[in-house]
Image (cartoon, rainbow, N blue to C red):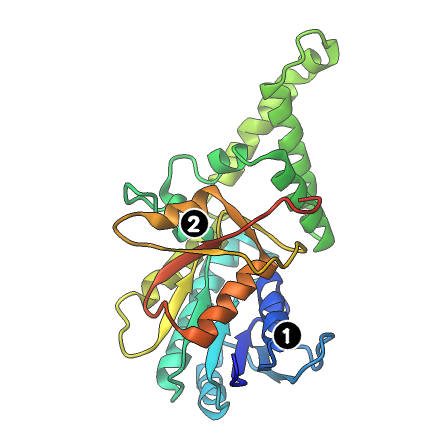
């Protein structure tokens, strides 16, 4: 890419947003991080600046988009996960405010929204988050390495309770699937393991628990049908992992009648490679008005 672009990243401090900022800077683009309290500086060298703005201030947020002279905008917005009961409502309101601000602004460049894997469609036309017993059944199918990743990252982010829940879930699943016929301890703990799994199913199928995924699906429906703006909606694959390796390798799958985006339900990618796909779209704008996902190699490190 020969031309240096000026790109706004909404939510630059999160797992996805920070990787997008890194990738943009590594390619020589100018980045403006926008959030309530964006970083004033960035550890990676390059032209970076922060603009504090709350998406609840639609007029102010719209003015930032109009006055920013941005070539593209990437939204990595996500509601806080402190109170699970409010995640859905806060997320829907936030996505709605961002949409209104963009539509009210004079910004006309590519707008890329990062949503959630639950919006991906199976070939038979059902979205992942509408599948039976979502998300318990899908957690149950995760390999141990992904559960290890999930628990480690929860502890890294200060979510100790969720980290312990994932470890207990992994143990209970192992107790059921690998009973250890000659282990008296395994048999004694079986009732507790079964109780843990029943409790996990109740929690993981609770709408409050999957509020982040459900509000991301609403965000997708907000943009479907909008034709007077350049937008695309990225649903990360079901096994998205950060702190991985940037290989630069990825495959794009578009939600279409052929059901190619189902690849995102069965596979994963590192955040670093997903950022490569996002910045490629910023530069090339080939997926306008599309709902897409991307997959790439994982398992190259401890996860």
**Residue 255 in the image, given as x and y percentages of width and height:** 33, 54
Q: How many marks?
A: 2
Q: Residue at x 65, y 85 (%)?
A: 47
Look at the numbered disc 1 and give the secondary structure of its residue.
helix
- Residue projecting furthest to the front: 2
| Residue at disc 2, secondary structure | helix
Residue picked out by circle 1: 26
Percent across and percent down for residue 216 are 43, 58
Residue 178 vertical position relative to residue 54 in the rendered view, above or below: above
Residue 36 in sight in this render: no
Tell me: residue 275, above or below residue 73: above
Above or below, 171 against 283 in this view is: above
**Could you tell me which residue is drawn at 60 percent across and 26 percent down?**
173
Give the camera-side residue of 159 and 24: 24
Q: Is residue 187 left or right of residue 66?
A: right
Q: Nearer the viewer, residue 55 or 28?
A: 28
Residue highlighted by disc 2:
118
At 48% from the left edge and 86% from the top edge, which residue is drawn? 70
CA gap, disc 2 and disc 1: 30 Å
């Amino acid at each position: 890419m020969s031309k240096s672009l000026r790109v706004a990243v909404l939510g630059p401090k999160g797992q996805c947003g920070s990787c997008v900022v890194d990738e943009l800077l590594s390619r020589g683009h100018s980045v403006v991080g926008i959030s309530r309290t964006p970083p004033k500086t960035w550890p990676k060298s390059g032209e970076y600046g922060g603009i504090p703005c709350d998406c609840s201030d639609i007029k102010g947020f719209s003015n930032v988009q109009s006055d920013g002279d941005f070539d593209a905008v990437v939204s990595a917005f996500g509601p806080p996960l402190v109170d699970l009961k409010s995640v859905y409502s806060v997320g829907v309101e936030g996505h709605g405010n961002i949409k209104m601000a963009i539509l009210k602004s004079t910004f006309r460049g590519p707008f890329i929204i990062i949503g959630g894997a639950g919006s991906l469609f199976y070939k038979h036309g059902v979205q992942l988050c509408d599948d039976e017993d979502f998300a318990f059944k899908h957690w149950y199918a995760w390999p141990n390495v992904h559960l290890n990743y999930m628990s480690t990252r929860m502890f890294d982010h200060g979510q100790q309770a969720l980290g312990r829940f994932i470890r207990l879930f992994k143990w209970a699943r192992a107790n059921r699937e690998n009973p250890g016929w000659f282990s008296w301890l395994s048999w004694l703990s079986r009732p507790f393991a079964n109780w843990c799994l029943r409790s996990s199913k109740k929690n993981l199928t609770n709408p409050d628990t999957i509020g982040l995924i459900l509000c991301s699906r609403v965000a997708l429906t907000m943009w479907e049908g909008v034709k007077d703006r350049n937008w695309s909606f990225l649903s990360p694959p079901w096994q998205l992992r950060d702190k991985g390796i940037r290989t630069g390798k990825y495959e794009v799958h578009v939600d279409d009648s052929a059901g190619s985006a189902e690849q995102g339900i069965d596979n994963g990618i590192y955040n670093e490679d997903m950022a490569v796909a996002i910045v490629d779209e910023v530069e090339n704008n080939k997926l306008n008005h599309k709902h897409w996902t991307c997959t790439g190699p994982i398992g190259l490190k401890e996860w």
